[in-house]
Image: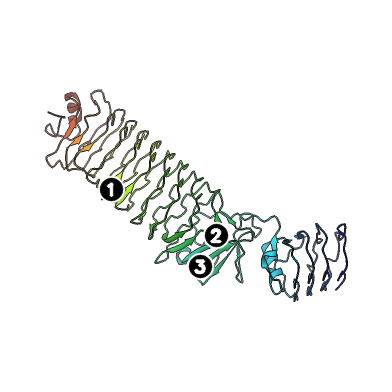
Amino acid sequence: SNMFNSCVLSDQFTLPSNFAPLVTNISAMFQNVTLPNNFVLPVNFGSQATNMSNLFTESVLNTDIDWSNTDFKDKTGVTKTDMFKNTNWGGHYFLVKNTESVTFLITDSGISDNTRIKVKDINPVLKTETANPTNFLDVPNLNRSQITKISFQNTLPTCSSPTDVSFDGKGGVMACVANSTEIVVGGPAGVIANADSSYLFSKLSVSGGVEINLTNLNTVNITNMEHMFKGSSLKAVQALSSDFGKTAVDMSHMFDSATLLANVVLPDGFGSVATNMANMFDGATLSSNFSLPGGFGSQATNMYAMFDSASLPASLALPAGFGSVAQSMRYMFEGASLPITSFTLPAGFGSTATNMSSMFTDTTLLAGFELPDGFGSKATDTTWMFENANLPANFVLPTGFGSVVIDMSDMFQYAVLNGDIDWSGTDLTASTATKGNLFNIITWNGHFILAQNQTSVDWLIDGTGAGATNVKVKGS
């Protein structure tokens, strides 16, 4: 007690490595002292103390003080009255071992600025979430289906039993339950989303929807957004940063089975480098004013079941470049409620895809729907592509569509024609594609398949389910 009270310590002053590890009373030990530069408190200093009152009262810091050699986790029964009363911080900090030590030192210690105690070499990166999680990052006593709000902050959250949700397990990021149904996540150095943020906000299915406030969550390093919002009911997703989704290469199942109750404004560049968008909106219900930003989907090679069974807004324009390098478009729009006002596919869409099996199965394509030039020109599998689809009047299959197909079995099976289908842009004379049930049980409504020439007509009739009067040369 009072050992160095009001002393003048030189910058060369150091404490030996075995200094006072068992001392119980260190009250006022450094009161009214200007602490040396690069001052390090030795291993276990204060670990056995029961009285720390006025330990650094009116002391002056010229640099950060390293107290990381002592772990105050689970330490109780210590008097800390005015431990940091009128401490002159000079913009510096006490650096401690972990966040439990931070909590210990700021509680009942008279400190005026809680941010002055922080973890040394703190890592503010969130831990990864488990697949199909029950709780949010293992925060106990609150099921994901009960969470109403998740928010992030640049300070440690306050609660009686915070949960360490940091990647390295050293307490750089902690989470608390607030107001019984909210999660607050924070750390003294902020919060950085893990590069693998898969499943992070999945299964948040509370009635009325969850609010997610991403203010203070740094998302710049995320590369994996797989299943990120899967199965969630989203009331609001606030403060999406301008870099959100710009670095993610895997967005598969990202909004799978999610419900967007309000508009989520995705920033420019979102999805611009993603290569995997399989099942991204599979079974999702999108808000009425949902839109996709520039660059979205321009690098995606996998669009398997991307909008399968999704409920899309009445009007949707897919941005330039979308789908221009995709290899798989199988099940892409199968069973989806497609836009009924405006639905525009950009130039190049579907021009590289090899698998278009069941792409528009069980859909209704609005009047005026058009397929861009080059669509289907590389497709080798178009089986069930328009099965049970309600096709628009004046529907045109672009030049080259079907020219390299290996299997087009059942492609128009059970489809409904509301006008002639113009397939005259491709000469099918030399095609060797499998075509069983190509036109099986179609509802023709008095309309025709229009082919380029008579040999194409003969090929389209032979063994496909079409009658001799259902297919004719265009213009005949």
Amino acid carrying label 1: it is Ser
Closer to the camera in the image, 182 or 407: 182
How far apart in space, not on screen, are marks 1 and 2 (Cα)? 41 Å
How far apart in space, not on screen, are marks 3 and 2 (Cα)? 13 Å
Name the secondary structure under disc 2: loop
Which labelled disc corresponds to residue 137?
Answer: 2
User: Residue 278 at what x, y percent from top left?
Assistant: 41, 45
**Contact check, label 1 and label 2, Cβ < 8 Å:** no
| Quarter containing the N terminus | bottom right
Q: Could you tell which of marks 3 and 2 lies nearer the N-terminus?
A: 2
Q: Which residue is mark 1?
A: 342
Name the secondary structure under disc 3: strand
**Contact check, label 3 and label 1, Cβ < 8 Å:** no
Q: Quadrant of residue 325?
A: top left
User: Residue 435 at what x, y percent from top left?
Assistant: 25, 32
Closer to the camera in the image, 42 or 407: 42
Q: Residue at x 34, y 48 (%)?
A: 308
Q: Is residue 423 left or right of residue 345?
A: left
Amino acid carrying label 3: it is Glu
Q: Which residue is mark 3?
A: 182
**Contact check, label 3 and label 2, Cβ < 8 Å:** no
Q: Could you tell which of marks 3 and 1 lies nearer the N-terminus?
A: 3
User: Residue 105 at what x, y percent from top left?
Assistant: 71, 69
Please say which color scheme the image uses.
rainbow
